[in-house]
Every structure is written in structure tokens, then in C-alpha cells.
Image (cartoon, rainbow, N blue to C red):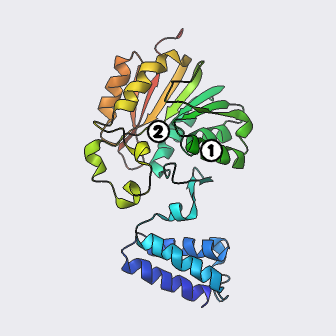
Amino acid sequence: MTLREALAAGTRRLTEAGAEAPARAARALLAEAAGIAADRLVPEAGSPLPDAARAAYDGYLDRHAAGEPVARILGRRVFWGRDFAISPDVLDPRAETETLVARALDGPAPTRLLDLGTGSGVLAVTLLAEWPEACAVATDVSRAALAVAGRNARAHGVADRLHLLASDWFGSVSGRFDLVVANPPYVTAAEMAELPRAVAGHDPHGALTPGGDGLSAYRAIAADAPGHLAAGGRLLVEIGWRQGADVAAIFRAAGLRDVAVHADMAGRDRVVSACSAAAGA
């Protein structure tokens, strides 16, 4: 079987399984199995697919046809133009989260930033890569997640500027920061039943939902943020698209100022921003 034949067969198989974008998925999985870059599949289309690579490809197709996302199979996801390793211990980063990065980069470069609940480290690592003079602290309650974040920090050359800390939100954090970012669990208990299988079946449950109304993480962050923001410091959090008004109200009640809700590329509320309460905070 040639690469061309394998790609056609894989595309048919995923189409029959009802997979999203089956041709693109088959291409990515075939390139991974064959050990070549995806953009080499066409130039090398007539090359034979070795037996071991074919077996690996068939296994990948089985997993994706059963609902496992391509990024989970590959163990990586592109975020803000960079490859990030992911594992079963961390969220698979979504494109919507890039809205938070864009909002952060719209503001002044921080000297010191904090990423709460870092997971794979996409926020902290991306911002450090974009701001070469900044340093960061990234926290998570999961040491396995911190290990993934550390791997990504090393891969992107920012490990010497990133301190990884086991902490439940601000629990073990000291000092003040020019920028605090977070993509906390926010799916409500009721919404969990509505999540696609690709999400609910593969992302860590605790990284998706805090239970209840989905707002408990924002309450915890808002309660301690004023004591950890430097004068003029900014707070940016990702939210569920129906939570803008609620999270904004939580932040205002905590004494934060300049609270605003920002939409993603689809026009849905995605980020809430705020600033420290006063210049002398």
C-alpha cells in the first residue's frame, strides 16, 4: 500500500465513522504513523507504507473513529503557532483560549506574571515566549500537569524564566504580579451532560468543571487577586460564553476596577478582564 492509497482508505474510513474533517484527520494520522511531515505526503505519495507504520496508522484510525481527538492521539496541539505537548492529565487547548493571549498582548509587557491552573502551560509559556524580558509563576494542583508544563517550557526555551508551583489557586503563591491569567474549570454540572464525547471523554474532569454553577473558581480567584496584583496590575480569565455578566459581577464585588467582558472570534463572550483596585494596591 502506498501513502496515497493509505490516505484515501483512511479518509473513507473516518468519513464512514462520521468523524469531523476526515481528510485532514487522516492526513495528520498518516504523517505521524509514517514518521514524516504532513507536507511531505503529496511529494512522497507513491512511496510504500511500511508494515509497522501501517499497523500504527490502523490503530490511530480505530481510536479516532471511536471518538478520540487527533490531538490526543498525537500527544500535541498547536497553540498560538507553537506545538504543545498534552497528556491525559491536562486539557487539550482550544483555539478560543487564544483570545486571552491576544488580550494580554494588547496590554503592557509585565515584569512578573502568574498563570493559575496552568495545565499544559500554554498561557504561561506562550506569554513568556512573546515577552522575552518577563518571568512567570505557573500553578496547578496536579503535579502531573506541572510536569507537562515543564516539558513545554523547556521545548520553547522559557524554562529558566518559569517557576512551577503546586498550589490551589493562590494558596501557595506569594508576592504581587503585573499580570494574572487563568483558564479555570467553568463548565456547570448541568452542562457536563451536554459536552461532546471528544471533550468529556478525554479531558480531565476536574479541569472542565468545578460542579454547581461553574463559578466557584472565579469566586476564589477574585477573593485573593487584589492582594496579589501590583499597582496597575491586570487580571484576565477565560469564561464560558454565558458567564460574562456573572463573572464581571464577581470581580466588581471583590473591588476590582475597569472590569470588561471580551468576545472571541465567534462573537461569544470569552474573557473577563479587570485591574487592581487602586494605584497603591
Mark 2 vs mark 1, CA separation in Å: 18 Å
Q: For mark 1, does the 10 Å Cα neighbourhood hold few (<14), some (14 to 19), or many (20 or more) residues?
A: some
Quadrant where the N terminus lies? bottom right
Residue 121 at x, y percent in the picture: 58, 43
- Decide which of 212, 254 is in the foreground and name it: 212
Q: Nearer the viewer, mark 2 or mark 1?
A: 1
Q: Which residue is mark 2?
A: 183
Residue tagged by mark 1? 147
What amino acid is at disc 1?
Ala
Q: Secondary structure at mark 2?
A: loop
Q: Secondary structure at mark 1?
A: helix
Task: Tell me: residue 209, above or below residue 57.
Answer: above
**Quadrant housing residue 253:** top left
How crowded pointer 2 is (Cα within 10 Å; few <14, some 14-19, many 20+) is rated as: many
Q: Residue at x 67, y 83 (%)?
A: 44
Residue sitting at the far front: 143
